[in-house]
Amino acid sequence: MAGKKTFVLRIDEDVFKALEKWSGDEFRSVNGQLEWIINKALKEAKRAPKSSKAKGEKEDEQ
């Protein structure tokens, strides 16, 4: 399994609150929701790394 990179993200407070609600509705953490959104966008744009493709498919089922 590849390691995870940490970074700081500045985001509008209202956007964060909406993201927090959405992630809670899907029983994910905000971080997990962001990863899911990013992986989905990469997959749809056909830019997903091959190593995370199987993981992205599993997460789509949630």
Image: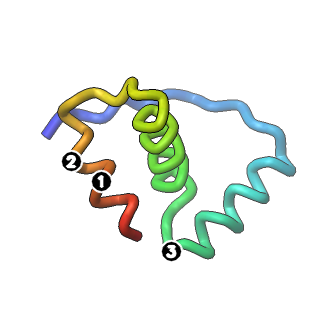
Picture coordinates of residue 20 (x, y %)? 68, 61
Return the residue nearer the eye: 53 or 13. 53
Which residue corresponds to the image point at 60% horizontal and 72% vertical from the top-left? 24
Verify CB contact (< 8 Å) between mark 1 and mark 2.
yes
Residue 27's mark?
A: 3
Which secondary structure lies at badge 2?
A: helix
Which residue corresponds to the image point at 59% horizontal and 64% vertical from the top-left? 23
Tally the marks.
Answer: 3
State the colouring used for the structure image. rainbow
What type is the residue that disc 2 sits on?
Answer: Ala
What type is the residue that disc 1 sits on?
Answer: Glu
Return the residue nearer the eye: 50 or 8. 50
Q: As displayed, is residue 44 above or below residue 62? A: above
Picture coordinates of residue 12 (x, y %)? 82, 39
User: Callout 2: few (<14), some (14-19), or many (20+) C-alpha neighbours within 10 Å?
Assistant: few
User: Callout 3: few (<14), some (14-19), or many (20+) C-alpha neighbours within 10 Å?
Assistant: few
Nearer to us: label 2 or label 3: 2
Residue 25 sits in which quadrant? bottom right
Q: Residue furthest right?
A: 14
What type is the residue that disc 3 sits on?
Answer: Phe
Q: Is 37 left or right of 43, judged from the image as shown? A: right
Which residue corresponds to the image point at 54% horizontal and 72% vertical from the top-left? 26
Which residue corresponds to the image point at 48% horizontal and 28% vertical from the top-left? 45
CA distance for labels 2 and 3: 21 Å
Q: Of the residues under marks 2 and 3, which one precedes in the sequence? A: 3
Q: Is 42 left or right of 4, judged from the image as shown? A: right
User: Callout 1: few (<14), some (14-19), or many (20+) C-alpha neighbours within 10 Å?
Assistant: few
Residue 33's mark?
A: none
Residue 54's mark?
A: 2
CA distance for labels 1 and 3: 18 Å
Picture coordinates of residue 36 (x, y %)? 46, 50
Residue 57's mark?
A: 1
